[in-house]
């Protein structure tokens, strides 16, 4: 079995450079999406704020996964990752299932029920996945619906900020 190490963007196998694999910088993306979310929410751009707020949570969770585990992308197979020497399908946009939940037990197993409910809600508000809000008309989301989504977002945000310090 090969020993795999990630050094910058290079995947090092047994001290030989095997391939250059460029993974997303989820931590920087999360920071940028939070700044975008801040602007959108202040302007009450509800649909875009819901979409970008969900993307922020996704990027933050993926950054936390990469911080807590040894993660590399499989060369020529961008839909596959190696996490702690186990090849898996790359995490999708799901915030509540799959590799995020499997490889972040300290986040998900300790999650209070109200935060889990909030995470499920921001993942799919009004039965539309957050990632699909990029296709939704602004007339679709009422002020009340956005305010409910925002309260759930803050609940998850506060919890993840606390957990981020523990990693």
Image (spheres, rainbow, N blue to C red):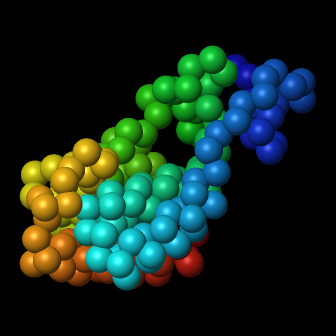
Which residue corresponds to the image point at 18% horizontal and 73% vertical from the top-left? Answer: 146
Which residue corresponds to the image point at 47% horizontal and 34% vertical from the top-left? Answer: 90
Which residue corresponds to the image point at 16% horizontal and 50% vertical from the top-left? Answer: 128
Residue 158, x across and y down, in percent: 39, 81
Residue 66, x across and y down, in percent: 59, 51
Residue 148, x across and y down, in percent: 15, 77
Q: Is residue 102 visible?
A: no
Residue 134 vs residue 84: left or right? Answer: left
Q: Nearer the viewer, residue 22 or 74?
A: 22
Is residue 5 placed above or below 49 in the rendered structure? Answer: above
Is residue 25 placed above or below 88 in the rendered structure? Answer: below
Q: Which of the 4 quarters of the picture holds residue 119?
A: bottom left
Residue 18, x across and y down, in percent: 81, 21
Q: Nearer the viewer, residue 112 or 27?
A: 27
How many numbered badges does the structure rendering display?
0
| Quadrant the C terminus occupies | bottom right
């Amino acid at each position: 079995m090969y020993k795999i190490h990630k050094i910058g963007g290079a995947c090092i196998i047994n001290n030989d450079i095997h391939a250059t694999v460029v993974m997303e910088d989820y931590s920087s993306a999360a920071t940028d999406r939070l700044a975008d979310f801040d602007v959108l929410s202040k302007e009450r751009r509800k649909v875009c704020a819901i979409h970008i707020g969900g993307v922020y949570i996704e990027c933050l969770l993926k950054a936390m996964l990469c911080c807590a585990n040894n993660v590399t992308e499989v060369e020529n197979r961008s839909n596959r990752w190696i996490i702690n020497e186990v090849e898996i399908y790359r995490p999708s946009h799901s915030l509540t299932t799959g590799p995020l939940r499997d490889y972040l037990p300290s986040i998900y197993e300790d999650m209070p029920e109200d935060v889990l409910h909030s995470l499920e809600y921001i993942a799919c508000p009004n039965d539309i996945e957050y990632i699909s809000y990029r296709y939704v008309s602004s007339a679709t989301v009422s002020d009340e619906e956005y305010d409910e989504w925002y309260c759930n977002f803050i609940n998850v945000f506060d919890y993840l900020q606390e957990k981020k310090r523990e990693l």
